[in-house]
Amino acid sequence: MASRKASLPPWTLGVDLSEDPQDDPALELRERGDLDGAERVARKALAKVVARHGPDHPDTLALRDSLAATLMYAGRIKEAEVMVRESGMLSLMTYGPDDPGTNSRMMNKAIVGFQMGYLDDAEKIFQLVYEFRFSTRGPDDPQTLLVRICQAVLRAERGQVRQAVDDLLEILRVAERGAPPGDPVVMLAKHNLKAASARLGSGKGPGLDG
């Protein structure tokens, strides 16, 4: 049976991985679009780490993030939501609200909430994540810019498309300074800027302000 391939929706929020992406065993397969293979690898690695370290070890939570990412890219949002919610609770109870990993899992909760249409909840969580990253990483850090991209996309989904385009242009300007070719934040900003600009030009969306 052929493997499922990843497909980009009109808006792409990606997924926020708390650990070094190079430590994600499913990353290469996911980037190639082999989501079946990525899921097998992530589940196998997760089972080994859970058996060795337990459910709330940082390595376990990182692999849960990897599996949640694969499920999200496969469009299995409800399954990803369960994984993200459980990981967030474990991270919060074990490491507290000021832990970068907990913050990252809050981000994933907002991303999944957005995909499921819970825009009010997603907006509140994105703002909390942004405030944490602004204070700990600064305004121009890629992880801070990633939250701003998500906030801009949410504005566009609410119909505030012109504001979203302006925000994404500013984010892209900052992200491109010294960024290497293929930088994921730059690519994400460009993809969503293209989608927002197309919506602005076509006049789609309720309450369009542009």
Image: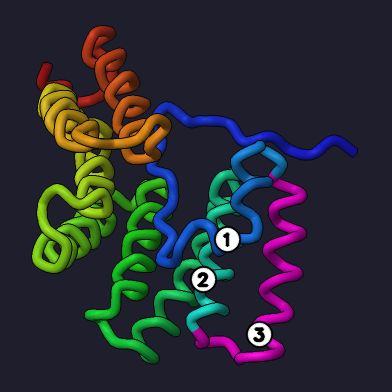
Q: At label 1, which amino acid type do we have? A: Asp
Q: How many residues crowd mark 1 within 10 Å: few (<14), some (14–19), many (20+)?
A: some
Tag 1 and tag 2, C-beta contact below 8 Å: yes
Magenta span contains residue 153: no
In percent of width and height, residue 8 lies at 51, 30
Part of the protein shown in magenta:
35-57
Of callouts 1 and 2, which one flags the residue occurring earlier in the amino acid sequence? 1
Q: Nearer the viewer, residue 4 or 16?
A: 16
Residue position marked by numbered label 2 in the rendering? 62
Residue at figure coordinates x 19%, y 34% from the top left: 177
Q: Nearer the viewer, mark 3 or mark 1?
A: 1
Q: Secondary structure at mark 3?
A: helix
Q: At label 2, which amino acid type do we have? A: Ala
Residue position marked by numbered label 3 in the rendering? 50
Residue position marked by numbered label 1 in the rendering? 24
Q: Secondary structure at mark 2?
A: helix
Q: How many residues crowd mark 2 within 10 Å: few (<14), some (14–19), many (20+)?
A: many
Tag 3 and tag 1, C-beta contact below 8 Å: no
Q: Quadrant of residue 159?
A: top left
